[in-house]
Image (tube, coloured by chain):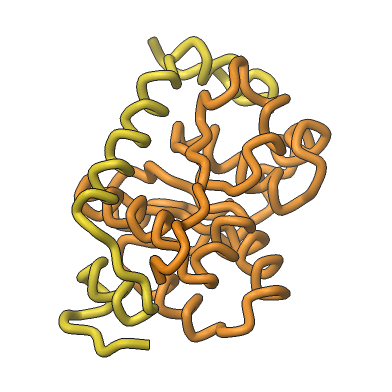
Amino acid sequence: VSDPNPHLRPVTLVLDTSAVVAFGEQSVHVGEVLVQVHEDHAIAAIPVACLVEASRVVPHWDLLELLLHHDDTVLLAEDGSDWRQVAKALPFVGDYASAVCAQVAVGQGAALLTRVPGRYEHLEEEPGDFIVEIHPDPPGSV
Amino acid sequence: MSQPTGDVRTDMRAMLNAAGIEVSDEGVERAREQMAEVRARRTPEKLNAMRAKLGMPPLPA
């Protein structure tokens, strides 16, 4: 993955595919976590693989553009140099985009925002070691 | 989508507002606590154990 931190601010959060989908569905909880990243003067990273997977089910790509163009987010393109680490993550998480996301989060020492925490449980020593689970928004909150 | 009130590239709440996401101070506080809990659980030992699974070297002590 190419340099994830061009702004020299710490990456404290990585969004996986489900988190990008949740943003596209206007998740209030995702918004609250992003505000927290902003207030920490940190960066939320979005791997390209997760964005592309999410774009299959998010109908309004203009929402994704808003997310990507904010100063506190960074879109991470892969340069291939970390392929061994991604390959090692794959058996733990089951799919390529999640493997990239896990590799970035573990490599950066960042939390991983997801709706599907169970996908990463075999990578963790104990459940919740690096996962921030997205909770459903209460009815009528959007 | 509602009209943003700030710069959607620099103001996170303005960006979220433009995306139709309205957050509350209480919700942001809950997110702060959730992030802090995860940070507390992610000890250097646990992080190094995960790094080892991915073939990454341990972090400097």
Residue B59, percent from left and from top:
46, 19
Q: Colour of chain A?
A: orange
> In the image, A60: left or right of A10?
right
**Residue B55, above or below A136:** above
Q: Is residue A139 visible?
A: yes
Residue A54, percent from left and from top:
65, 67
Q: Is residue A8 visible?
A: no
**Residue A90, above or below B11:** above
**Residue A68, above or below A102:** below
Q: How many marks?
A: 0
> In the image, A103: left or right of A25?
right
Q: Residue furthest front?
A: A139
Residue at 49% from the left image edge and 66% from the top image edge:
A23
Work out whether residue A63 or residue A141 is closer to the camera in this orientation and state it: A141
> In the image, A23: left or right of B17?
right
Residue at 39% from the left image edge and 66% from the top image edge:
A141
Residue at 52% from the left image edge and 41% from the top image edge:
A133
Residue A50 occupies quadrant:
bottom right
Residue B56, percent from left and from top:
61, 25
Residue B17, percent from left and from top:
29, 76
Q: Colour of chain B?
A: yellow
Residue at 38% from the left image edge and 52% from the top image edge:
A5
Image quarter hosting the C terminus of chain A: bottom left
